[in-house]
Image: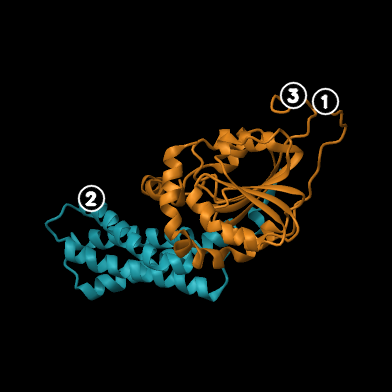
Chain colours: A orange, B cyan
Amino acid sequence: MDALTRRKWDRAAGAFDFINGLGAERRWWPVKHEFFSAMRGKVLFVAVGTGLDIGHFPPGLEIVGIDISDKMLEKARPRVEAYAGAMTLRHLDVHDLDYPAGTFDQVFTSCTFCSVTDPVRGLEAVRRVLKPAGELHMFEHTGSRYFPFNALLHLMNPIARLTGPEINRDTVDNVRRAGFDLVEVRHAFLDVVKTIHAVAPSPRVADPLHPEQIPLQLDEPLLVAPSDGL
Amino acid sequence: METRPYFIAGDLLCSLLVGGVTGVAAIATFSEAWPMPAAMLVGMLLGMAVAAVGILAFGRFFGMIELQMPAMLSGMLAGMIVAMIVTRRPLPPSTGAILGGVLGLATFVAVWLADAWLSGDGARWTR
């Protein structure tokens, strides 16, 4: 487990809800509500934090929430107990996911991969625990491709990373580099706050992360229709 | 793109205040004795410092990540422009406040328009 990141988020846990629980939650309520409504089957939620997002989860699902900070998990526990479904918490770093390959139907993240130390390795670990064609849904803030926003985010990043996340990452590219097939990216604020929908590739070719699976022979590519606009 | 009055008002107010306060601070800091490039650079940093305070003050109510873009750019622009003018001729603090506020307003509008362009339906893509 990455001790430095763990300490950083343990320190942040005390004031996390005070800073993020009012304005940010209210601003992103409509986007997040639609985003989390896509939850289906057995779900892994990476970086559950203090559980602010649990209120958006559809009821009746089997969800595992993990977080690197046990102080965050302590804060999340009452919200987990209030969830109308089977939700469990684990103190776990995303790099060290110890679930068997192909355990989950979906993985959700919310402002997570701005803070994961090695985002591509973390996303590869996520891909391993997803079933073939399993879905990755991310609500993330990232860097920008456009001036002056990209320059500003690069300039501010050294300060931001001291207290919390990195604010200039190319998370969409990290998802690609981790071997996911991108389905849809939707910008929620500039090109900085966005939702990313990707799928773990079906085993049409031998996959080193799922060596036990026999490659399927599909003539047609997998098509996933985009959802309606925001 | 943001259309809710609560958040538009919050982002706008923060940008106006950051721009205005930075304008006054720039007038208090710089004079004709400063070389213009140095004053512009320090003015930009001064604007960032003022914006950081504004973001901390307003962030809880309006969301820090979204607030920081217009506020930080307002501070940087106001600091740079007002510092540049002050190295040429002295300005009263009220003019600095108004000029900074106008630059804050302009920055807010520019960011809002950029958001309308980048986060509209045209920005959604599939692959």
Residue type at numbered disc 2: Pro
> Which residue in the structure is indicated by mark 2?
B37
Chain letter of the residue beneath label 3 in the structure image: A
Say what secondary structure mark 2 lies in.
helix
Instruction: Point out residue A45 in the picture as x, y percentages from the top left corner.
Output: 63, 49
> Which residue in the structure is indicated by mark 1?
A214
Chain letter of the residue beneath label 2 in the structure image: B
Instruction: Point out residue A75 in the picture as x, y percentages from the top left corner.
Output: 52, 58
The residue depicted at 56 percent of the width and 57 percent of the height is A76
Instruction: Point out residue B63 in the picture as x, y percentages from the top left corner.
Output: 48, 63
> Which residue in the structure is indicated by mark 3?
A211
Q: Quadrant of residue B34?
A: bottom left
Task: Give the CA separation, mark 1 to mark 3.
Answer: 8 Å
Q: Quadrant of residue A123?
A: top right
Q: Which mark is residue B33?
A: none
Q: Is residue B103 left or right of residue B34?
A: right
Q: Is residue B21 left or right of residue A136?
A: left
Task: Give the CA separation, mark 1 to mark 2.
Answer: 65 Å
Say what secondary structure mark 1 lies in.
loop
Task: Give the CA separation, mark 2 to mark 3.
Answer: 60 Å
Q: Are marks 2 and 3 in contact (CB under 8 Å)?
A: no
Residue type at numbered disc 1: Ile
Residue sitting nearer the eye, A170 or A111: A111
Chain letter of the residue beneath label 1 in the structure image: A
Q: Residues within 10 Å of mark 1 (few under 14, many from 20)?
A: few
Residue sitting nearer the eye, A199 or A194: A199
Q: Is residue A182 left or right of residue B26?
A: right
